Amino acid sequence: MFAAKRHDMGEVEFLIGRVAFERGDLRKAKEQFIIANAKSEGRAFEAKDERYRLLIDDGS
């Protein structure tokens, strides 16, 4: 019931991406960060470590 009512702003994907990034799984991190970025319209990355944003801004 909670999941159906909550606004999905990419928080879960951002956290999964953050853990993957810190573990060195950059492929998984990038996938999750792209989803988080789309859902949050970029807000998920505000005031966060810029390394996370750079991973999806690298153009590849």
Image (cartoon, grey):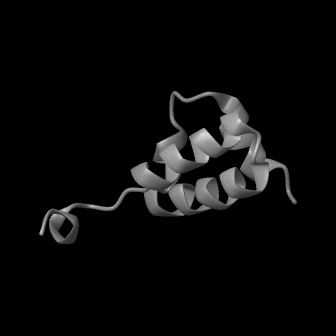
Q: Residue at x 41, y 49 (%)?
A: 11
Q: Please state which of residues 33 and 25 is positioned toward the viewer in this rendering.
A: 25
- Point out residue 30 in the picture as x, y percentages from the top left corner: 70, 54
Q: Residue at x 55, y 55 (%)?
A: 37
- Point out residue 21 in the picture as x, y percentages from the top left corner: 69, 40
Q: Would you place residue 42 above or below residue 45 in this image?
A: below
Q: Quadrant of the N terminus?
A: bottom left
- Point out residue 52 in the picture as x, y percentages from the top left corner: 67, 39
**Residue 52 shown left or right of residue 7 in the figure:** right
- Residue sitting at the far left: 1
How many dots with numbers? 0
**Residue 59 shown left or right of residue 11 in the figure:** right
Q: Residue at x 21, y 61 (%)?
A: 6
Q: Please state which of residues 21 and 57 is positioned toward the viewer in this rendering.
A: 21
- Point out residue 31 in the picture as x, y percentages from the top left corner: 67, 61
User: Quarter of the image holding residue 20?
Assistant: top right
**Residue 11 shown left or right of residue 13 in the figure:** left
Q: Please state which of residues 21 and 49 is positioned toward the viewer in this rendering.
A: 21
Q: Quadrant of the C terminus?
A: bottom right
- Residue sitting at the far front: 23
**Residue 45 shown left or right of residue 25 in the figure:** left
Q: Would you place residue 22 above or below residue 17 in this image?
A: above
Q: Residue at x 33, y 61 (%)?
A: 8
